[in-house]
């Protein structure tokens, strides 16, 4: 019986197995090191902050609203008499002075009324002369009867009859005088209506609208029809609608300014003149009208223009400013996640920014370290906040964390 002889391992195969183990250990160690570098260490390297420098500037806390422009002084010119519009002497855009003739209504009917009333007045005055003659005759006859009764040449009834005739003549004269006064009053009214057929400008200004047309029949019986509007465009009123949440922040006399479409870089300034106490409700939203005036010497502002209005609640010039995002900014030690970055406070809201309050900022020191400082803040808008104390001009503060930092810390593809 023969016994099989196993082959003896060669020295070469032993060396191969050893090198294979060395390579495997090297790969495992390299992978561990690479994971440590890309997963753990980059938490510091990948954290990238945004910085801002505390600087001087002007800041305003404002209440915004949308408004429309309208002339402060204007008048709707109407007709006080009925008739056909015969002439219109002005057009839209015409400059007029007080007393200028604007339009004419056909005066034929009105002139006829004046003529008839004048004729009636002449007739009544002639009647008055007749009644005065009758009165004089009655007075003479009464005196004659009195003389005769003294000589017993007439009867008492004749004297009484003469006295009654005198009294009747006097009463007729008084009645006729009252009729003359009434007719005279009617004549004044008819003459006034005749004058109203010629419509004059009640004020100086610009004709901004003409609603009547030549040949149109004007009916002034129920309500005076509006023919045109004259406005003084040298001063315009901005009428804004402010929500009930913001109207309590407005005070009479506070500064306000606005710009209009096409002129965003130009501002017109004024002061709040009136807050109307009665609101308007639009789609269940309560709005209050706030008005202020602006000069318009060059008449670049026109009626019904849209204005973006800013009521200045508080303002400061040459104030120390930092971005609102710098308030409560995270430090290097906090290593905020993306969700924490979104949830952290971003400083006071503009509506609360007029009162002094405290907050914290992260200051980047020249040495590369970071320092948390407590600061007192003042006026704030949606972008910047005023620093009253705690910072100096030129200090660098952390204003935010770049969005890629949190992703780099987790590693690609990790939730």
Image: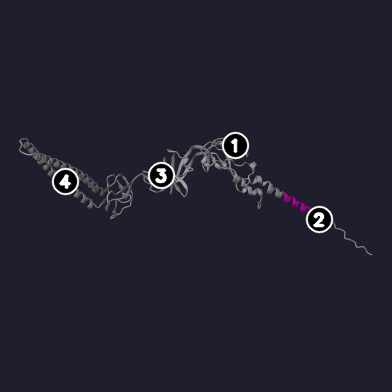
Can you tell which mark lies on residue 124? 4
Q: Secondary structure at mark 4?
A: helix
Identify the residue at image location x=83%, y=57%: 13
Q: CA distance from mark 4 to mark 3?
A: 59 Å
Identify the residue at image location x=78%, y=52%: 22
Q: Earlier in the sequence, mark 4 or mark 1?
A: 4
x then y, percent, for residue 291: 41, 42
Q: Earlier in the sequence, mark 4 or mark 3?
A: 4
Q: Is residue 142 left or right of residue 51?
A: left
For the residues labelled 4 and 2, say whether their Cβ atoms are less than 8 Å apart.
Answer: no
Question: Can residue 409 be seen in this snapshot?
Answer: yes
Residue on which disc 2 sits: 17
Q: CA distance from mark 4 to mark 2?
A: 149 Å
- Magenta residues, start to end: 21-32
Q: Earlier in the sequence, mark 2 or mark 3?
A: 2
Q: Secondary structure at mark 3?
A: strand
Residue on which disc 1 sits: 373
Q: CA distance from mark 4 to mark 1?
A: 102 Å
Q: Secondary structure at mark 2?
A: helix
């Amino acid at each position: 019986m023969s016994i099989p002889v196993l082959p003896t391992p060669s020295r070469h195969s032993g060396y191969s197995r050893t090198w294979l183990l060395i390579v495997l250990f090297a790969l495992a160690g390299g992978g561990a090191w690479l994971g440590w570098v890309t997963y753990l260490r980059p938490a510091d390297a990948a954290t990238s902050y945004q910085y801002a420098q505390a600087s001087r500037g002007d800041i305003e806390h404002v209440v915004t609203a949308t408004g429309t422009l309208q002339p402060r002084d204007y008048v709707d010119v109407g007709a006080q008499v009925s008739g056909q519009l015969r002439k219109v002497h002005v057009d839209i855009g015409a400059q007029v002075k007080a007393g200028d003739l604007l339009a004419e209504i056909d005066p034929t009917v009105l002139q006829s009324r004046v003529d008839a009333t004048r004729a009636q007045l002449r007739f009544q005055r002639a009647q008055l002369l007749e009644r005065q003659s009758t009165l004089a005759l009655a007075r003479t006859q009464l005196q004659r009867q009195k003389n005769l009764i003294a000589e017993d040449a007439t009867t008492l009834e004749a004297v009484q009859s003469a006295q009654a005739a005198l009294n009747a003549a006097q009463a007729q004269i008084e009645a006729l005088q009252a009729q003359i006064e009434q007719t005279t009053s009617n004549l004044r009214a008819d003459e006034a209506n005749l004058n109203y057929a010629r419509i004059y400008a009640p004020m100086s200004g610009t004709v901004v609208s003409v609603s009547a047309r030549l040949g149109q029949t004007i009916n002034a019986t129920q309500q005076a029809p509006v023919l045109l509007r004259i406005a003084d465009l040298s001063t315009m009123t901005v009428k804004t609608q402010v929500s009930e949440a913001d109207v309590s922040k407005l005070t009479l006399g506070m500064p306000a300014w606005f710009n209009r479409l096409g002129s965003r870089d130009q501002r017109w300034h004024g002061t709040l003149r009136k807050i109307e106490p009665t609101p308007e409700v639009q789609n269940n939203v309560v709005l209050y009208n706030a008005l202020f005036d602006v000069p318009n010497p060059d008449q670049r502002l026109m009626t019904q223009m849209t204005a973006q209005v800013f009521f200045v609640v508080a303002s400061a010039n040459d104030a120390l400013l930092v971005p609102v995002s710098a308030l409560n900014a995270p430090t290097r030690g906090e290593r905020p996640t993306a969700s924490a970055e979104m949830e952290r406070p971003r400083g006071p809201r503009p509506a609360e920014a007029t009162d002094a309050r405290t907050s914290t900022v992260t200051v980047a020191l020249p040495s590369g370290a970071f320092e948390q400082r407590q600061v007192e803040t003042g006026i704030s808008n949606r972008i910047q906040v005023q620093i009253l104390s705690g910072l100096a001009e030129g200090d660098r503060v952390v204003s935010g964390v770049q969005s890629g930092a949190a992703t780099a810390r987790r590693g690609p593809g990790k939730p």
